[in-house]
Amino acid sequence: MGRDLLTSTFQEKLDNQQKLFVPYIMAGDGGLNILEERITFLEECGASAIELGIPFSDPVADGPTIQEAGKRALENGTTLTNVLETLQDSCQRRFIPIILMTYINPIYTYGIEAFARDCVKSGVDGVIVPDLPLEEEALIVEHFQNHSIALIRLAALTSPEERLNKITERTEGFLYAVSVTGTTGARATHKDEVKEYLQNLKLMTKTPVLAGFGVSNSQQANDLGKYCDGVVVGSKIVDLFHNDKSEEIKKLIEESI
C-alpha cells in the first residue's frame, strides 16, 4: 500500500504500453454514499489511480467547475474526517490507488500525524497539497514518509529551471505537471511551449510525468501524452458525473489510454 502501490500500479500500466489516466472527483459531490460506486466505476473504466478532492472553503487552485462541486459537497456536510471514514469502510474492496487533493489548512486542523495515520487506515496512497510550497514542506514530509504516503509535487510552467530541479528531485508517485497558467478547468488548446516543458520534465525525472489542468477531451490527452506519461482530468469528469453522463466518462478514459 501507500507510495509503493502507486509506483507499482503506474509502472505495470506503462510496461503494458498504456498511458496513465488519473480522473479527479470531488468527495461528497452527490453524497458520500455514492463515493465507492464512483471509484469502482472509474477503476473498471481503466483509470490508473483516482485523485479525490476534499472540499474546502478557499480552493485557490480550483476553477469554476470544481469550486461548484466543492460547494455542493460542503452543503452535503462533507468533511475530511467523514471522507477518510468512508474510504476506510471500503478500502478492502478496492485495488486502485487513491490520491487525496487537499489544502494545508484542513490537514493542519486535523492534526498532521493523525492525518497521515488515518490516511493509511483508509487506503490513501498519496496526497497533493497545492498551497504548500517547497520551503514549508518540512511541516508534513517526515509524517508522510513514516507512513509511506507519497507527497506528489506540482510543477508549474512559470517555474525557473533551478526550482523545477528541486521539485523533480523530491516528488513521489508522479510529477504533476500543470500545463496551463491559471486554475483548473477546460481549455481549447495547449500551446507548443507546454510540449517543450513536458519533454524537459521527462528528462529531469524518472518518476512518471502527468499533465493536468485544462485537459478535457481524449484528443488533448493523446496530444499531451506524446510528451509525457499521461494526464490528470478533473473538471470534465466532475461535470460529466454531475450531469449523469457516465458513458461519456468511460469513452473518454478508454480513448485516452
Image (spheres, rainbow, N blue to C red):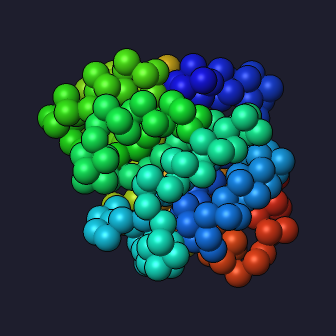
Quadrant (top left/top right/bottom left/bottom right) for the C terminus: top right
Q: Position of residue 160 (x, y in %)?
A: 21, 39
Q: Is residue 4 above or below residue 234?
A: above
Residue 184 in view in this figure: no
Quick one: 90 or 43, which is closer to the camera?
A: 90
Residue at the location (70% across, 81% down)? 243
Quarter of the image where one finds residue 234: bottom right
Q: Is residue 256 left or right of residue 56?
A: right
Please say if 91 is above or below 162: below
Position of residue 125 measured from the top left corner of the image (x, y, whole percent):
54, 32
190 or 185, nearer to the observer: 185
In which quadrant of the rendered image does the N terminus lie?
A: top right
Check the image and report above or below for 120 versus 132: above
Give the residue drawn at x 76%, y 78%. Answer: 244
List x then y, in percent, for residue 165.
28, 26
Q: Would you place residue 177 above or below residue 14 in this image?
A: below
Quadrant housing residue 237:
bottom right
User: Quick check: 167 left or right of 63?
Assistant: left
In-front residue for pair 53/233: 53
Q: Which one is in front, 79 or 131?
A: 79
Residue, x 21% and y 42% (percent of image)? 133
| Left or right: residue 151 compared with residue 224 | left
Image position, residue 113 (x, y; %): 31, 32
Point 43% across, 55% down: residue = 80
Q: How many marks?
A: 0
Asked if residue 17 can be seen in this view, the reply is yes
